[in-house]
Structure formats: structure tokens, C-alpha cells
Image: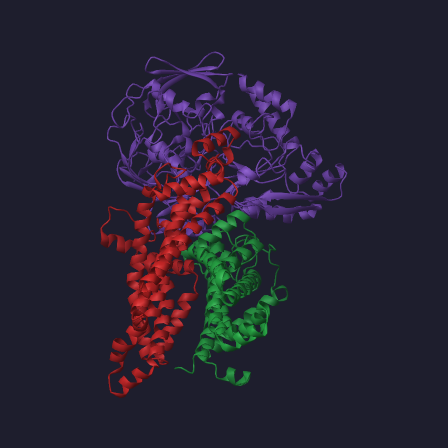
Amino acid sequence: MTSSTWGASRRDFMAGAAAGGLLLGMALPGAARAQDSTPKKGGTLRVGYTQGESSDSLDPATYSNDFMFATSYAVFSTLVEIGPDGTAQPDLAESFEPSADAASWTFRLRDDATFSDGRTVRAADVISSIRHHMGEGSKSGVKSLLDQISDIRADGDKVVIFDLKAGSADFPLILNDYHLTIRQDMDGRIDPDSRIGSGGYVIESFEPGVRIELVRRDDYWKQGRAHFDRVVLLKVGDPAARMNALVTGEVDLIDRPDLKTLPLMARNPNLRVHTQNGTLHYTMPMNVTAAPFDDVNVRMALKHAIDRQAIVDKILLGYGSVGNDHPIASSMRFYNADLEQHAYDPDKAKHYLSKAGLDSLDVTLQTSDAAFNGAVDASVLFGEAARAANITLSVSREPDDGYWSNVWLKSPFCCSYWGGRPTADLMFSSAYAAEADWNETSWSNPRFNDLLVSARSELDQDRRAEMYAEMQTLCQTDGGALIPAFGQYVSAMSTRINMPEQISEMWDLDSVRFIERWWMA
Amino acid sequence: MSPVPKLILQRLVLGVVTLFLVSALIFVGIELQPGDLAEQILGQSATPDTLAAWRAELGLDLPPHVRYLNWLGGVMQGDLGNSLASRRPVADLLSQRLANTMFLAGYAAVISVPVAVVLGLLAALWRNGIFDRGVNVGALSAISMPEFFVAYVLILVFSIQLGWFPTLARIDEAQSLGDALYRCFLPALTLMLVVVAHMMRMTRAAVINVLASPYIEMARLKGVPRWRIILRHALPNAAAPIINVVALNLAYLIVGVVVVEAVFSYPGMGQLLVDAVSSRDLPVVQAVGLFFAATYVTLNVLADILSILSNPRLRRG
Amino acid sequence: MTVTTTLKSAPPTAWFGMAVVALTIVVALGAPWIAPYAETEIVGAQFQPWSAAHPLGTDNLGRDMLSRMIFGARNTVGLAMLTTGMAFAAGSVLGMLAALRGGWTDQLLSRAIDVVMAVPPLILALMMLAIVGASIPNMVAVIAFIYIAPVYRLARAAAMNVVRLDFIEAARLRGEGTLWLMRREVLPNIASTLIAEFGLRFCFVFLFIAALSFLGIGIQPPTADWGSMVKDNATLITFGDVTPLIPAGAIALLTVAINFIVDWMLHRASGLKT
């Protein structure tokens, strides 16, 4: 697996994918978690991060890598935070209530929450901060996610009301997004470069693309959080350098360790590997409006011509699980466990080919490691496996730069990935609904789209489960997305780093809130 | 005008013309690359209207020649512009990286130039002996290793096995000089191994060349000791080619260390440039590219001037 | 001096160099017959240790390391050779042209070359590859383009010394064309300089390709090449695994070998003086 030193794999999760999760199922890799469950204050946390660029800025509309996501959560705070069970938990908002139709949400702010300059957090701050991402001139990655808001208004200093264009039971989770941190209002706008936030840490020094040093706020209003005295985030792009720094004790935690060396690293008693089953998954979208993918039999043939297990074993080195051509992770609520697993079966693939009236098939798969790390290798493996089914799959490697603009959503068959959305509704609405901006496959299944709308407002949970199960079946048998695998988030750290018994697995490192939630033994 | 100042003036004018052309080349280069800054930042989450908003704000929607002339106008007035991505002035962004790059280059040069010259002299003194051959083979081997390989082996030995030096060359203003020297020892050593061979071989060749001349023969016949001949007579006369190769290697230490910076996570200009190219942050690419080109041109002009001045015949005109 | 006596006078280092180069050429040419497995064939589990079936073990996708090394010789060395050859062809023609024509041709070419040389080669390669896309033909073209500059300089400088000589003047007066002069008079006189330089440049190009592959923009998978093989396995060094040292050692060995030969050739050329 290669990992490009620059450019390529800059975004781990979708900008805008940040909505939190409902009932993640609390799937925890229980083994070897937290030796000492009482948080302790003190210590300096030093992190070696893969990403981070000299072009980074504190403007929340511009965040595009883990380095800034982690910084954002440490220095600023959001209205709600995602809990270990995947639900929205109070953060700056002490409570939030929907209207009867869930089309209007009322958030009440805490009285004691203050910015690092001592000023309390007010409704106007929230409104300006959210509006920073909305409207005509917005450059923000969450702009389309916020399109559902028709109005934000204040009711006094402490109450903010969001009016939505349609009812949405999952709305509060969106406000966990790292873009949507609350800044100080200045005459109806925020100063995007201001360093004043209401989070547990203040910035001592910041050199974009190199390092940021954070110091704990003594007057932090949230109890039982922000345990480290100091936090240093370092950008260490080279995987070998990152690993070396951890082994020699120059950093305490690294993200994206080189997977193949993990068995060797495990021999070191001072280090441990940490994995999380998130919603991250890899896709190979086929455009169902373009030949030959407009024939469902061709799609099914390809879905049976890929050796999913080989991709999990060889590309993910076992740190993942096979996908079943729908985007709902097994740890998510409404996952359809009864659905038959698609497996590598060249005969079945040939059978579908003949149903499509074909003896053999020639297709081109456009790929790049910008889509996901190892995408090129995965495509090569796919090509080798497909040959047995009379399918000639040519792998066309595209430049990493500009991949998302020039290939993705334009190519009839390419590689992509999703950081995943925590709820079935958000996931389907983002990439599978007919009218979605990011409908990778141009798939438009009337039954699916009807179900999507009715499930969103369905309150009977059993009925809802049935609906989502049927939608997963439709994706799998009719949809254009070939989803070979779900990946795990993997990090490596010193055994001195402790974390709560239950963490949020939605995104890497306690959903990127580790700085505030973890501590040092 | 006497020939020396005229020569120098000529070189300087040519240097400025070269820099101007380099800036145009870089601009065209970035323009031709697929994607722009807006696409790089938004990536998969881009929508047409957010892209348009970015471009309008950054002026990326203006025609290329207008943007280039705007930039050039700024530079003429000493304004390098702002980074497109972070909106910080390019000058601010550059200053720290520049200091880091110069520190590492200076560090490596201070170790490697004396080492190279002394080894070269000794090899010339005992030429064709065991020492000469040994140093020669060692130097050739060192120059033949890929930089990243040298770096990894040094890390393996000195950081992981022995635990003497850190693997990350972290450097910031708060550090004392001693601390900075300690932290940057491994990258400096890597660079030394890369550049020393070239300089050493040139020193040896130049000195041996001079030793073959008749006046040295004369001195030797007079009974002047060999080391004295080399230091007093051969070295000064061999200075021009040595200065040239030293200048070339200094330029390399400043502009060519991208790989070493990557391996040791050293925040130098090379990493900045690579970042800026990948995010299409044109003002930053221009500034760093111009700095590199200026370094190269200046050192070359300087080497020319020094070799003119050190050459008695040319000096007399 | 005949070839035999010349070879006999060669020092052991030069002999060593020639042996390594000869071996590499044989391996590179005969790769499909010598290698036990195909270049991209997946033959076993990942990271198998050394065994009789896989003398150097297997790599991160379960491909035979030895076969990859052998094909890597063909790809890495072959491409470096092709690239250097292209740079020399273009660079020496342009250099001789500048020397023979002088005036505006010389000025224009020399200034253009100055500009190219003023941009660090790695950065130039990075930018150009981002424009044209990182494929093998593009990489060869880009590196060849970058290395035209130093070859041009050398060829021009060497040719300058030749064009001042009387016989060139005589040929010019006879009315011979530039092309004729280049081929018949200048090239034979600067050939030895160029050949010695070729060896050194080949090493630089070779290391340059390795560096590009290390940075992830050189030779692209699944093609086997030594630079990417080092990069793919670099993290294993931390744990004392020597896998990445094998391709890195191969790169170093070949460059050392060529340098030894070049050194000997240069030594012979200047031998009369010392």
C-alpha cells in the first residue's frame, strides 16, 4: 500500500459528512482498552499526523484535513457533540427540542459557557457562525448540508431556533460537524481567522503544515474534559518517519500507521494498536445511465467478478470487512443482516453476462490513490479476478491531482470512497437519492426514493427498519455502486494514552475529539 | 570600463532576466496543471456554486495574463502578495521556512566543506596510495546511495538502535542553538554524505592538476616539504574550480533537499513548495520558486566572480 | 593501445564495475526467462520470509520479491538508459549548434537553458508531471527534458574549444553546412568528453527516478522498479527487517559500479598529466 507524501489523500472524511450518528451500536473493540478508567490531569500529548498543509487556516469554511479537524474540536466547540452511542449530546447547547413535525428545532445555550477571552457564548455567536457557511458567497464544504435550513433566529440571548424546509429527526447531529464550530459574532459576522474559541484549549503557536501547540484553559467551563496540560500536533507526512517517531518516543500517538508493520510493532510492550469500526467504505460507482452499465445484468456480473475478501486481506491487510454493495455499515442501526452476501463467483458473473446477451465484457475502471489509499492496487486485483469471468477490466490510473473534479462524478466507472454518514437516512440522501448532488451512480429508482422520503418521517421503528432493509436490498441488486469493502480506522499509540471505556467510533480517534476526551496515565 | 566590473554587471543583468523568465515559466506551469486551489480544497465535497465562490474571492476567475501582470506589479513594489489558501502574506509564510532552510544548509555546509577540502588535500598529498583509494571508494559509494536510503539507515542506527539522536528534526524559535544543532544532526549528516564526495573529488583533481605544473616541480626540487607545497602553492591556485564546485553544492543544499526534508519532517522551503504546488497556491509557488532560482543564479554569479578574482591572470585583466 | 591491453591495465575497481554492469545488462535483457515468476503475478501470501520457493520472500501483495527485483532491473535501468540517451541526443545537438552558429542562436538557447537550470530539477519534474500526468512515457520525457540543460552546457563548452580550431574554419570556407560540420568535425572531437559524462549523468538520472518513485510520482504500480520497492517497504527498516535494503542496495551497487568505470576512464584520459 503506498501513501503519497503530498496531495493525493488529503481528505479522510467527506467535508460535510460530519453529521453525527444515531445509535452506532456501541461496538467497541473491547480488548486492551483503558487500563485506568479515571481520567487524570496533566502531561503533554504529542501527535504525529499524516495530513496538514502550509495552506491551512483557522477559517472553518476551509478545513480539509485531520490536522485542522482535531484543532477545530480542541480550540472551538460545537452546539452538540457526538456521543459513544452515536447520538447527539449537549455541548454548547444544554438542550434541544424539535417541534411536533421536526421541522423546527430549538436549542438552549448553557449559561456558563465562555470564550477564552471571558465573554459568554450568546445566540448571536451561533447564528453568525452557522451563517458563515450558508448563502450565496459560501465557499464551505457544508454548504449543501445546510441548504435544509430556511431560517435561524434568536429568542433572547440564550435560545436559537432553526427552521427547516422539511422535517428531519436527525438534524442536531449535523451540528457536530467540525466546520460548524462557534466563533464570536462581530456585527453579524465572524472573524474567520480569530483564535478565540470556547473550547478547552487555546493556541500557543501555529505554523500551518508544521505544528500547532495548544495549552489547556484553566477556566474551561466543561467539567471532566480537557485533561492534557499541553497538546502538540505535528505534521509528519512520511509513513516511515511517523512510525520511527512513535517507536523512539518522540510522539505519543500517530494516525495511519503503515499497516504491514503493525504485527512487528505489537512486539513493543510500550505501544499498542487502536482500531475503530467506522462507516468508512470504498466504492466503485458505475453510472447506470451509461452503457454498458445501464444493463442491470452487467452491473450484477461485475459485482460477482470482484474478489472482496482478497481486497480486505491484501489492500486493507485485514483491517476491514467485505462490503455488500450498499453503504450501511454492520455497526449501524437498520443494517440488514439477512441480505445475502455478494461473493466472488466467476460462474455467476458469466451467467449474468449471458443474461445481458454478452459472452465477454470490456470495461475500463478509472482509478487513483486519491480515491483511497490502495485504490490502484485494489483495481489491479479486481482486474486479475475479473479475467476468470471473461471480463477484461482495464485499469486506467488517473492523476491524483484534480481526481475529484475531473474523474469522479464524470467517469462512468471509477473509484471513490465515503467517510460515511452515521444514519441510514443521511447516507442514502447524500449519495443514493435521485436528486443528490453526489449521486455517484446517477441511480434513480422510484421505489427507493419513495421509501427514503417516507422513512425520514416514520416514527414506528419496526416499520422504519423494514423500509431501510428494503432500500439496502434495492441498492444491492439494482444500484450502481459496487462496494467491495468497509475499512477500519487504525492508529498506534503509547500505552500511556488512556481513553474512556466507550468512545465514538464514527470517525478516527474518538470521532476526532480525542484531545478533549483522552488522558495520560 | 575595466573588464572585471563589466563582466560582473553582465552576469547580474542576465541573472535578473533569468529570474523574470523563471517566474513566467512557473506561472504557465501552474496554469497548465489540472485543477485549481478551489478544487483542491473542496475535493470531493465541491459543488459548482462553492467552487465559483472560492474563485471569485481569490480572483481566479480573472484571465491568466491579468493575474500574472497583477502579481508582477506587486513584486516590482516588493509585495509578494498573499497566500491564496490561508490569506497570510507570503512574506510571513516564507520567513520562518527560509530561516529553517538556511539553517540546515549552513549546518551541512559548515561540516561538509572543511571535511571535503581536507580529505581532498590529503588524497592529493598521498595520491594513488591506500588512503587515496580508500577515500575515493568511500566517496563514490556515498554519492551512489539514494538520499532517502542514507537517511533511513542513519535513523535505524543512530535513533532506533543507539537512541542518540531524534528522528524528527523539529525546530522552532524557542530552541537554543545547541538544541537545534542536536535535533538537526541526522539530516545534516545525510546531506553531508550526499555532497562531500563531489567536492572532495574536485579538490583532489584540481590540486593534482596544479601539482603537475613546472613551478611546483621547481619548489619541490628546492626541497620545500610536500604539505607546504600543497598548502602554500597548490591550494591557492586550485581555488577557482574548488569554489565553483562548493557553490554548486551550496545551491544544492538550499534548493535540493526535498527528500531529506520529507524523511525527517523538517519544515523547510522544499516542503512548502511541494505543498503549494499540490494546492495550486500560486503566489507561494512563485515566491519559493523565485527564491530557489535566485539562490542558484546568485551562487553561480558569486562563484564566477570569486574565480575571476582568485585567478591572478584574470585579475590583472 | 588495443582493447585487450586497455582492459588488462584496468584496476580491480573498474573490473568490479564492469562485472556488475554486465551482470545487470544480462539480467535486464533476460528478465522474462530468468525470473521465476511474472512481474505482477500474485504467487503467495504477503510478506513470506525467504524460502527455496521465494529466495527473497514475497512483497506486500504476495508477489515474488526476486522476480520483482529482476524485472525492476529491466524497468529501472532500461528507463534510466533511455532517458539519459534522449537527454544526450538532444543536449549535444543543441550544444554543438549553439557553438557552431553562435550569435543569436547561441544567446537564445543559452538563456533558455539558464532558465531551466535555475529551477530545482525535482520541483520542475513535480510541476511538469502534475501537468502531463504521472505515466512512464511522460516521466521519461520530463526527466530527459530536464537533463538536456547540463548536457547542453557541457557539449557547448567542449564544442567551443573545437570550433575555434583551424580545420573548422577551413571547412566553413569550403562551404560545408552546419550539419556536416557537426557530424564530421565537432562530434568526433567531443565524443570522449560526452561519453565520460554519460556515465555520470546516467547515475544521476537513475537516482533521480528512484527519488521520484520514492516521492510517489515516478514509475507507477504495478510496474516493478527499485525506487518504489524501497518506498513500499521503507517502514520495515524501523523493525530491523532488511527487505527495503535489497532494492536500495541494488541501486547503490549499480551506481557505484558505473562510477568506478567512469572514474577509470577519466583517469586514463587525464593519465598523461599525473
Residue A316 against residue C107 in the figure, above or below? above
Estimate the x, y position of residue A232 in percent, counting from the top left: 31, 41
From the viewer's perspective, tell me whether residue A160 is left or right of residue A372.
left
Does residue A304 appear in this view? yes
From the viewer's perspective, tell me whether residue B33 is left or right of residue A355.
left
Q: Nearer the viewer, residue A123 or B197?
A: B197
Instruction: Identify the residue at image location x=52%, y=47%.
Output: C131
Q: Nearer the viewer, residue C68 or A32?
A: C68
Estimate the x, y position of residue A150 in percent, counting from the top left: 47, 17
Estimate the x, y position of residue A314 in percent, counting from the top left: 55, 48
Task: Give me the chain that's purple.
Answer: A
Q: Nearer the viewer, residue A513 or A182?
A: A182
Residue A234 against residue B220 in the figure, above or below? above
Does residue A463 appear in this view? no
From the viewer's perspective, tell me whether residue B256 is left or right of residue A309.
left
Instruction: State the hue of chain C.
Output: green
Residue A110 against residue B178 in the figure, above or below? above
Which quarter of the rendering shows the C terminus of chain A? top left
Q: Nearer the viewer, residue B123 or B217?
A: B217
Task: Give me the chain that's red.
Answer: B
